[in-house]
């Protein structure tokens, strides 16, 4: 009896957590199809009339700047994620499967940099990119941070679980280091890469502080910086919440798509370290 009570209690708690995560997203989606007056009167119900006017208003808002910044975010997030995973996986491969002088000291030093707040580096990054005239470009949004220590650490831990005999067998077959990295290591660590792809894309897509500090031209800004400026109400004191809901739906869709693309790898990543020699 006590075991059944524990199971029921656990299921109830899981349902509550699931509801807390899903209900706000559903409300956001439903409210994005309401007019402003109906949203003010009926924020928790199904709209009496489903309208797409909020989305068309967003497309035409400020000469289509939201559309431009949306594709800016897609481009920056995709390129940043790809470069981060390439750099991190190469570094992790070197730290995991090669021996060189000072390897442990360098690795510990890199881990120590994770304790430094990112905000401290903004002035230095700003001065560096201003010297080379690269402010207000995509580069200033992409290149700082591609040497991601967290991704390096996670991939190294995953690669440490791969048997060295596997790499030695590939070398006996005539494979070089690049071939081993591409054809042996990467396929085996694909679950970790998939999970890190989701986390890296999510972090860059939701980034607000970095571009808001380093960018002044709206044409190169991500949508997360431009979306809070959305205010097309009849009064300077009013906020068009129906448009805000539609904007939130638009910026959420890419995250959902990325998760569904990498969900198998993400779920498989929980078995990290399961491969033993």
Image: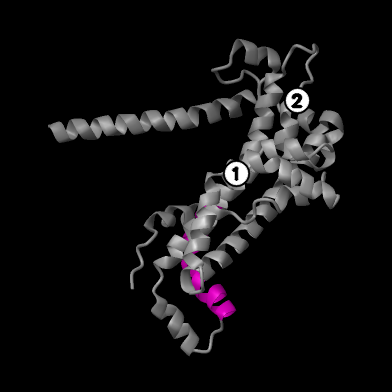
Query: Residue at horizontal 58%, vertical 49%?
Result: 200
Q: Is residue 241 above or below residue 259?
A: above
**Could you tell which of marks 1 and 2 lies nearer the N-terminus?**
1
Does dot 2 land on a helix, a strand or a loop? loop
Position of 254 compared to 20: left or right? right
Position of 39 compared to 152: left or right? right
Quadrant of image for the N terminus: top left
Nearer to us in this view, 244 or 182: 182
Quadrant of image for the C terminus: bottom left
Q: Dots 1 and 2: beta carbons under 8 Å?
A: no
**Numbered badge on residue 203:** 1
| Residue 55 image point, x, y percent | 73, 30
Q: Is residue 108 above or below residue 47?
A: below
Which mark's residue is nearer the viewer, 1 or 2? 1
Nearer to us in this view, 185 or 37: 185
| Residue 169 image point, x, y percent | 43, 84
Does dot 1 land on a helix, a strand or a loop? helix
Which residues are the magenta region? Answer: 177-196
Query: Residue at horizontal 64%, vertical 55%?
Result: 146
């Amino acid at each position: 009896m006590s075991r059944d009570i524990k199971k029921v209690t656990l299921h109830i708690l899981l349902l509550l957590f699931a509801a807390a995560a899903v209900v706000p997203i559903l409300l956001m989606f439903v409210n994005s199809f309401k007019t402003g007056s109906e949203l003010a009167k009926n924020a928790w119900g199904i709209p009496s009339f489903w309208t797409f006017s909020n989305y068309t208003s967003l497309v035409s808002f400020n000469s289509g700047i939201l559309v431009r910044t949306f594709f800016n975010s897609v481009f920056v997030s995709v390129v940043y994620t790809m470069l981060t995973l390439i750099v991190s996986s190469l570094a992790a491969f070197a730290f995991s499967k090669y021996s060189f002088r000072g390897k442990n000291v360098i690795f510990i030093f890199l881990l120590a940099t994770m304790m430094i707040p990112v905000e401290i580096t903004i002035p230095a990054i700003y001065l560096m990119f201003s010297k080379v005239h690269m402010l207000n470009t995509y580069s200033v949004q992409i290149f700082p941070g591609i040497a991601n220590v967290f991704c390096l650490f996670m991939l190294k831990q995953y690669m440490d679980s791969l048997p060295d005999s596997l790499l030695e067998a590939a070398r006996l077959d005539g494979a070089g280091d690049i071939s081993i990295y591409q054809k042996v290591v990467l396929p085996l660590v694909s679950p970790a890469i998939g999970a890190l792809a989701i986390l890296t894309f999510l972090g860059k897509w939701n980034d607000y502080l970095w571009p808001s500090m380093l960018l002044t031209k709206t044409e190169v800004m991500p949508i997360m910086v431009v979306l809070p400026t959305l205010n097309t109400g009849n009064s300077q004191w009013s906020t068009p919440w129906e448009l805000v809901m539609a904007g939130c739906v638009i910026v959420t869709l890419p995250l959902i798509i990325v998760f569904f693309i990498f969900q198998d790898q993400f779920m498989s990543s929980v078995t990290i370290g399961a491969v033993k020699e």
